[in-house]
């Protein structure tokens, strides 16, 4: 089963690129971030024609997440709306659509768009840290339901110096600060493993390049888009790759897809029924 994540930086602007990529790669599940469109305006039909079901949680012009899946999604949760933890003031997070989760083929899929944080010490940075702490508590609850968790998306954090093209220049700054990394580690709690680092131990692999200063042409990138899997899933991983080819498109997203291939037993297969058609994965 092929599972991918991609910050597309506007679903309507990149729609044809996304459809082209789907036709080439044929993912079973594709999690999108920064869709930047309200739910009623999400372009559902092009994906339905390809045999996908769609779950969306969006807002106008900013943020927004979606799960596009060939396999029927169950127990869909949007944001922290269904999460009630007395230690977290979730009210401050309701206006920004940054998380959607669902049970798909026996796996808890959690798609996130972590706040950027702007700059250390700013109100936006405090919001980022608080949001991640709420995500950690959210995962504590999800872990009670299932051992099979796949957490993915744009985390706006480079986990180590290996994930930045010039670590000395950016170390300690936004997306590379100790507090961001330690807060991310608190989310993972050693229960979730970085899929990419299972297969690749070296630096030089990026998922995001700034639009400015010819960053892509000069290969000055960061690895800030991640897929984390529970230990129970890690033994089933066949691969994890970053597909940089969409960055060559005209008017591309500044991010590229990251995808994993998981070997699951046929007994876990679900079905998606869409009117007259059945799709078996």
Image (cartoon, grey):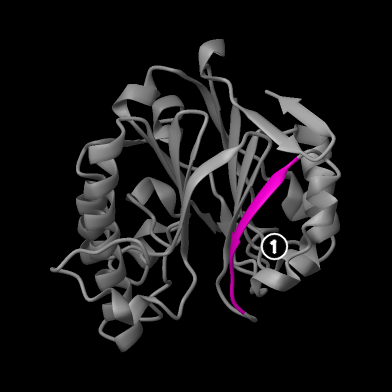
The one of 279 and 265 positioned closer to us in this rendering? 279
SS label for mark 1: loop
The stretch drawn in magenta includes residue 56:
yes
Residue drawn at x 83%, y 40% as measured from the top left: 50
- Asked if 267 appears above or below 129 in the picture, the reply is above
Whether residue 7 appears in this view of the structure is yes
- Residue 152 located left or right of residue 121: right
Prevalent SS, magenta region: strand
The image quadrant that residue 169 belongs to is: bottom left
Provide the residue designation for mark 1. 253
Answer above or below: position of 247 versus 93. Answer: above
Q: Position of residue 1 (x, y in %)?
A: 60, 25
Q: Position of residue 181 (x, y in %)?
A: 26, 57
Query: What segment is highlighted magenta in the picture?
Result: 52-59
Whether 93 is drawn above or below 156: the answer is below
Is residue 249 something one can see in this rendering?
no
Q: Where is residue 75 drawn, in percent x and y?
A: 46, 46
Q: Quick one: which residue is furthest to the bottom in this view?
A: 123
Q: Residue visible at 57% across and 68% down?
A: 64
Which residue lies at the image location 28% right of the left edge and 49% below the top edge? 139
How dense is the environment of label 1, judged by Cα within 10 Å: few (below 14), some, or many (20 and up)? many
Quarter of the image for the C terminus: give it: top right
Tally the numbered discs: 1
Side (left or right) of 191 relative to 106: left
* Magenta-colored stretch includes residue 123: no
């Amino acid at each position: 089963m092929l599972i991918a994540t991609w910050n597309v930086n506007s679903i309507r602007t990149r729609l044809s690129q996304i459809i082209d990529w789907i036709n080439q790669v044929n993912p079973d599940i594709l999690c999108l971030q920064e869709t930047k469109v309200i739910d009623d305006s999400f372009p559902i039909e092009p994906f339905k024609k390809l045999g996908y079901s769609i779950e969306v949680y969006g807002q106008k012009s900013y943020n927004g997440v979606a799960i596009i899946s060939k396999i029927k999604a169950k127990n869909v949760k949007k944001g922290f709306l269904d999460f009630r933890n007395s230690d977290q003031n979730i009210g401050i997070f309701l206006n920004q659509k940054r998380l959607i989760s669902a049970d798909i083929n026996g796996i808890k899929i959690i798609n996130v768009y972590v706040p950027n944080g702007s700059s250390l010490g700013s109100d936006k940075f405090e919001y980022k840290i608080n949001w991640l702490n709420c995500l950690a508590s959210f995962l504590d609850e999800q872990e009670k339901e299932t051992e099979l968790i796949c957490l993915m998306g744009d985390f706006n954090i480079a986990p180590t110096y290996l994930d930045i093209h010039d670590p000395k220049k950016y170390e300690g700054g936004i997306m590379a600060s100790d507090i961001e990394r330690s807060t991310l580690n608190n989310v993972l709690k050693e229960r979730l493993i970085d899929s990419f680092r299972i297969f690749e131990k070296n630096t030089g692999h990026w998922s995001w390049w700034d639009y400015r200063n010819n960053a892509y042409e000069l290969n000055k990138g960061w690895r800030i888009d991640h897929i984390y899997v529970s230990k129970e899933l890690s033994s089933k991983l066949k691969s994890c790759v970053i597909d940089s080819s969409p960055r060559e498109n005209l008017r591309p997203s500044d991010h590229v897809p990251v995808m994993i291939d998981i070997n699951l037993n046929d007994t876990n297969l679900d079905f998606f029924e869409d009117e007259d058609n059945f799709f078996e994965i």
